[in-house]
Image: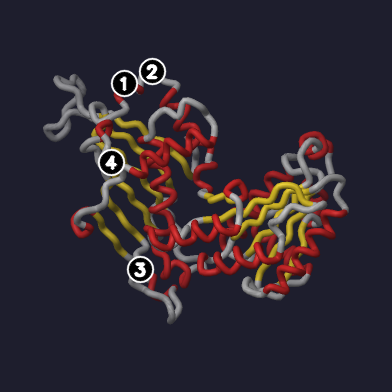
Amino acid sequence: MDDLHDMNSVKLSPTTIVIFGITGDLARRKLLPALWNLFRTGKLPQQFHVIGFARRHFDKNALRELITKSVGAIQEQDEEKYESFLRLFSYQQGFFDEPEQYRALRARLEDIEHGFSAPANRLLYLSVSPVHYESVFEALHKSGITKNNKTSGNTRVLVEKPFGRDAKTARSLDEKLGGLFTEDQIYRIDHYLAKETVQNIINFRFANFLFIPVWNKDGIDKVHIELFEKIGMEGRGVFYSETGALRDVGQNHLLQLLAMVAMRNPEKLDAEHIRARRAEVLQKLRPLENIATESVRAVYDGFEEEVETNGDANTETYFKLRAFLDDPTWDGVPFILESGKRMHERATRITIYFKNVKHSLCPIDGGKGCQNTLTFEIQPEEG
């Protein structure tokens, strides 16, 4: 490995990652490219290994091909480094509800970790359909993989969205997690919160005196949060037909962005204080009284052709709704949430519409004065 990798990773603890569902969409589109970027910039530990766990029968070459397709074209000057990256991976075939496969996984983890110079942290990442969550949780617990031993350091179970289908199933899933693992072992992941622009919203809001006095119902007319994708199902037809756009991105990504806009000053830039302030906002969300008048849901042309026979072709691929907060600070301010597949652009943005001033001197258009807006561009270009 090159000097940059050695210099930056020397102080990091040995780490093993198990990606359950490594052959799936999330791993291919997000996790594997992210690991490659961390590796090539020297931000992974020197003692590091990834075990891919999935139902497919894969040999070494098939795994290499999967990773290469996920990471993209490798420049010639990176070939040697990329070969080093590929050597960090191994694969174990198994079904998510087979106990013997988890016993074999535990043995493999311990064998890898015995070769490290210190106890290794374990990250157990569930990149699988939510229908498999409980099976994986229970199997991990019963196998002892999440228990600390001589070869392991801290163990974390990472769970991606969607977290349940509704409030009842989300609570049930949370109770299951709490019964099997300690709270500090559980990471409930929304990868949108890791985007730099999203994190910078807090700094922008609370480090600029210019905006603090007007960041409320007296200064803001409405907030529009958009998440558009140009792609369709990309092989996820069955999953999407069971989930829909609202569960896929609405109740997690867009609500998290709403919370970042509306939250009070966390006073400290740490996870605990920011999480508490976000939770305050979400608890004040007003239930929709009339879904028919306050929301729109639709399906793009051709969706039914991308859904297999056991899928629901009527599940929404687009939605738009108005949300309100029962909070004096935001009384009457609509937060418009909008997302869809097969849209005219790929973009995620937050647009703040400020109220018009009386006796505005800017040019009048259609009988209305000009309106000031502030836009946070989250993707494809952050800014």
Front residue (pair 110, 224): 110
Q: Amino acid at mark 2?
A: Phe
Residue 209 got which mark? 2
Q: Amino acid at mark 1?
A: Pro
Mark 2 surroundings within 10 Å by alpha-carbon count, few (fewer than 14), some (14 through 19), many (20 or more):
few
Q: Residue at x 19, y 23 (%)?
A: 357
Q: Secondary structure at mark 3?
A: loop
First in sequence, mark 3 or 2: give its number. Answer: 2
Mark 3 surroundings within 10 Å by alpha-carbon count, few (fewer than 14), some (14 through 19), many (20 or more):
some
Disc 4 to disc 3, C-alpha distance: 27 Å
On the image, numbered disc 4 is attached to which residue? 325
Mark yes or no: residue 71 visible.
Answer: no
Front residue (pair 46, 355): 46
On the image, numbered disc 1 is attached to which residue? 213
Residue 299 got which mark? none
Q: Amino acid at mark 3?
A: Thr
